[in-house]
Amino acid sequence: MSVFVSDKFLIDMKTQRFSWNGPVLTKRLLRGDSPLLSDKQVRHANANGGLNLVTKVGALAADHLQSVEGLAAMITSFVEVHRGFLLKEITAQAMTFENLKGAIRSGGLFFSPVDGRYVEFLDRPLHEVLSAPYLIGLTRELAMARVGTWIGSLFVYQPPQFGFRPSEQRLLLAALQGGTDEELAAVLGVSLSAVKKTWRSIYDRVTHHSPGLIPDQVPEELTSERGKEKKQRLLVYLREHPEELRPVTL
């Protein structure tokens, strides 16, 4: 589970008496005092200063707790979902000793309520840390100074250059999973003509901002292979530049 939260909620988490963030979030939601950012707030924060990410360290089924492949799949999934956002701080709470050790090895730091900052070590053993609520995390500034960790890699960011509209982003995100235009139309619940129109808008936008990225446009009826090449080159680029598909206020 991961959510984007307000600055105030993150400050409260670090300055008030520590609590397990799952129950705190649930209680706030039930009483109508949600600290979760709306879609509009996510778009604004992602273009202005950055986002606070609160996450539960991922859990694996008991049979896979010692599985290298399972752990790698979980980390890969987490990175794919969050890479490309303008993150300013990540916080988490691991629920098992193995999760806690993994979070530390991955680049996480303990938040010390005494010092009011992230530190490498607390004044007690790890098994005692798990006996009460605590925070582990990282800020963008610390990540830039601690090169080489996979958590730190999530803070690498560059602004999008194309400014895709939400409808264009939805089509591109679906296209990254594969499928023909007919299949994409079914997935998105729109007409085939709407899909083709959106592709034309996407290609016009990309060509305007980066003329050399995709082959010159040609009438679709002249060659379907040229159209496939154009699409594949764009999708390859987007896999390396997920910021183009994240919500921002332009």
Image: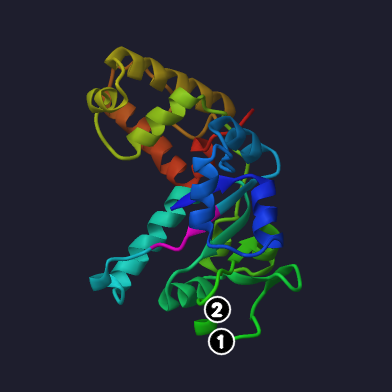
Instruction: Locate residue 221, reporting x and y percent.
Output: 27, 15
Q: Main secondary structure of the magenta part?
A: strand
Query: Which colouring convention does the figure follow?
Result: rainbow
Q: Which residue is pictured at 36% across the width and 66% down the height?
A: 72
* Cβ atoms under marks 2 and 1 closer than 8 Å: yes
Give residue 156's mark: none
State the quadrant of the C terminus: top right
Q: From what the image shows, is residue 98 above or below residue 38?
A: below
The CA span between labels 2 and 1 is 6 Å
Q: Which residue is pictured at 68% across the width and 47% down the height?
A: 7
Residue type at tag 2: Val
Q: Which residues are magenta?
A: 54-58
Could you say which is closer to the camera, residue 8 or residue 176?
8
Examine the rendering and report whether any part of residue 212 can be seen.
yes
Could you say which is closer to the camera, residue 207 or residue 65?
65
Residue found farthest to the right = 115
Examine the rendering and report whether any part of residue 84 can be seen.
no
Mark 2 crowdedness (10 Å alpha carbons): few <14, some 14-19, many ≥20: some
Q: From what the image shows, is residue 65 above or below residue 85?
A: below
- Can you identify the residue that label 1 sits on? 125
Residue found farthest to the front = 31
- Can you identify the residue that label 2 sits on? 129
Instruction: Locate residue 175, reporting x and y percent.
Output: 34, 34
Instruction: Locate residue 51, reporting x and y percent.
Output: 62, 46
